[in-house]
Image: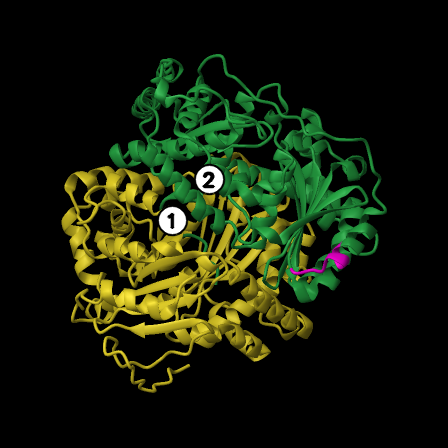
Chain colours: A yellow, B green
Amino acid sequence: MKKICFAVALSAAMFSVMAQPRLPKDYFWKKLDNGLEVMVIENHKVPLATIEIAVRNGAYTEGPEFSGLSHLFEHMFFKANKDYPDQEKFLKRTQELGAIWNGTTSEERVNYFFTFDRDSLDAGLRFMNAAIRFPIYRTEDMQKERPVVDGEFQRAESDPGFQIWYESQKKLWGDLVTRKNPIGDHNVINTATPEKMMIIKDKYYFPNNSLLVICGDVNHEEAFAKAQAIYGDWKNSGFDPHQKYPIPEFAPLESTKYFVKESTIAKTPYMMFHWMGPDTRHDSAGTIAADVFSTILGLNSSKWQQALVDKGLATYAGVNYQTEKYVGPIQIYVLPNPLKLKECYEEIMNQIKLWANADYYTDDQLATAKQILQRNFIRQTEKPSSLASQLTYHWCSTSYEYFTDYIDNYTKVTRDDIKRYVEKYITNKNYVAGIIINAEMNKETKASEFFKPNL
Amino acid sequence: MKKFFSVAKYLWAALFVLIAVTASAQKGDAYEMTVNGVKVIVQSSGNEIVEIQTIIKGGVQNYSMEKQGIESLAMNGLTECGTKKDDKNSFKNKLDKVSAQVYASAGKDYSTISMNCIKSDFETVWPLYADAITAPAFNEQEFNRIKQDAVNGLRAQESQPDYAINNMAKQIAFAGKDNAKSPEGTVASLTKLTAAETSAYYQSILTRSRMVIVVVGEIEKSVIEQKIAAMLAVIPEGKPFTLKKETISPVKNSFTPEKKDLATNYIQAVTSAPAPGTPDFNAFQLAMRIFSQRHFLEVRTNNGLSYAPQSWFDGGSSPSANIAVSTTDPNKYIGVLTTLIEKTKKDGFTEDELRNIKTGYLTRFFYGQETNNARASSLVANEVLHNNWKRALTLSDDMKKVTLPELNAVFNKYITNLVWAYQGDPAKANAVLFTEAKPAKQELPKSKVATKKKD
């Protein structure tokens, strides 16, 4: 899916002459001279505006010494800057604007977003500008924020679902696990310094590594003019951070790995299975096929659901692929019936073996899955304030064209595409399998004895 | 392309009182009608999605402590145990075909049977929805499956610390009252239930006298009327039903610890709050919102004690004020909280805070307008709890009328003795600090106190 490279002569000299990406209706894109991409999404359903800045930063940019610091950096965004020099003033400003706000850090994106009354757009853009460009990192602020971030980590660790996921990631990604773990490392978080924050800022926080989205009850020409006026003098870094600081490639999983994790807080067992899946750099078609296949497996009529959920072996059995630029994981997450744990595990293994068979699903199920994905898209676009984050996800992990075309591309997926996907990434491929279970149930069910490779 | 885990920042920013936030962007477009004695509330949506919620009032008031979980199981059974026309698989496969959602859930005050579909699928989905409500089969084999799943799901839910601490706190604070019951039930109560008993129970609460129906979507009035009339024709009128409202007034502070091997400690306090429909309700809503901001500032920003300090007003038929935190330093936390409550009671809130919270309310008002599901849920909550669905449309204006003296008065009136629940390491908490941490009764200056209640 190559970009269509027509040079567009813009009447306003303020914007670079750039190729216009192919976009959905009511999406308008421009690139400022400093490299900042600006997307305006007009949606007049409610009189609100949402602004979001996404930065191509996150766990994938972190080696062990920085593990979790993209996330800490994101917390510090909400702390202090030149216009609002402490968090009390920062918070007061959000309250004056009546803003709903948040930020997230994931593997391939860090994003910050505010929703407020449409008439506060100018004020909101200025507020965002101060925070993204002129943060202040004080040692005392960081000392206060480190336990907060670590507290978020501890909350996650108090959840058995996170525990099994975390253990799986370590085994799946090996030495590069920090590149897939946004929450990071306790020690790195608790010893972080302002100097480390500045290193992140000086590597990634530039207009040419960021996307500003202005979404909601706005006019695109006016929004572009405001973006230019407020962000136009943000200085380009002069380098592409992802060329200067390349992301290392993940090595294929060398062997299948199993683990049984005992935990007193797991009142019922959970199982997880992971494979290394396709990514959008090398196999966009595979990522699309993955979504369609996962949707087929989610159908009540699928062999997968019938064998596991319908037969009472599992309360839940979901298969999911996460689209990413640097190796997206394929995940099975099962909440098994603890009274039939062994049977459940054996049936999972049995079903996976059948996935590549032509008769594993019907033509009707394939068609239904495509219909579901199309209807899901209608639901995804229902909430105007969520549109910005949907777009920035794609900007970081796929492309504008991928975003514009993916629903249409779902309809083009063939049986051969799915077979290729399953055979290339799952069948006879190494994987990581884990179960989290409390000691008593482990003893009763003998999980440690049967939860072993048999594929 | 679903994600399993990412780190989201400010948890509290997404938490606010469920029932209070939504209203109509176009206030004139909602109407009510009575069909076979049941109030039907309709709001247009301007989009392709249709959301319908059929409500059965009563919630935990409908069953005894020994039978808790029965309504939840009954609701699940409507869509998971087949109907008189379709077995479970046939029913679910038909829904899958059009990616429609028909599901039911049991709450503290009412159960909701929901339908969400694309408008073009309405004629396909409605008969399935009506069948689920009027002709559920409660097939015994399927029932046994969902019962096991319910037990399993409950154990998984109890492994989630936020759920577990809230459940524990409510059980202690509302001991002996309906609100101490859990709609999800317990392993013991669920295990004893049979298909026949659950089916009979469902028939006993399926009466027109307990029902309200809300439709949000672009469906013609005559179509709605005709379809709902046909559905209601087979449902008995039943005895008149009024939802009981029950408040608490803790007579002293209390502290109940429970040892759990968590990475941090979860703590929640519950105390009194005004009932829906009383004059204090709106002012208390705003007071708790502002207090939530102060709590966040003191606990997280100024003292770095927690990632997720929260406080909120649960405005159901058994209302409560709630303060919660996860922290590794509970003793320091209780000191900070006590000082904060004392200061708030002594000095009151400010005009700035009141003005800002009203601005924020307006944003949330429209934010809650973005999806048909949110609109329908707000209409339902206001109708059932306040006996006034139009409140969902006037809420933003209603809140503008709240004055500072009213705000101060309600905070002083309701934030009194705190019932604490604690899960984690009991050795980390000094119980005396919690039980003796009683903010002194403060006399506010006359200018800060309401001299009479709102009409």
Q: Position of residue B81 (x, y in %)?
A: 75, 49
- Left/right placement of residue A419 relative to residue A248 reads right
Disc 1 marks which residue? Answer: B8
Disc 2 marks which residue? Answer: B16
Which of marks 2 and 1 precedes in the sequence? Answer: 1
Q: Position of residue B223 (x, y in %)?
A: 76, 59
Tell me the residue at 19%/49% (across/down). Answer: A83
Q: Secondary structure at mark 1?
A: strand
- Left/right placement of residue A188 relative to residue B243 reads left
Q: Compared with residue B410, is residue A346 higher up or lower down, i.e. above or below?
A: below
- Residues packed near mark 1 inside 10 Å, few (<14), some (14 to 19) or many (20 plus): some
Residue closest to the eye, A58 or B220: B220
- Left/right placement of residue A423 relative to residue A138 reads right
Q: Compared with residue B115, is residue A283 higher up or lower down, i.e. above or below?
A: below
**Amino acid identity at mark 1:** Ala
Residue closest to the eye, A349 or A380: A380
For marks 1 and 2, give the one nearer the viewer. 2
Task: Name which quarter of the figure residue A217 lies in.
Answer: bottom left
- Residues packed near mark 2 inside 10 Å, few (<14), some (14 to 19) or many (20 plus): some
Magenta segment boundaries in residue numbering: B218-224
The quadrant of the picture occupied by the N terminus of chain A is: bottom left
Disc marking residue A150: none
Residue B222 included in the magenta stretch of the image: yes
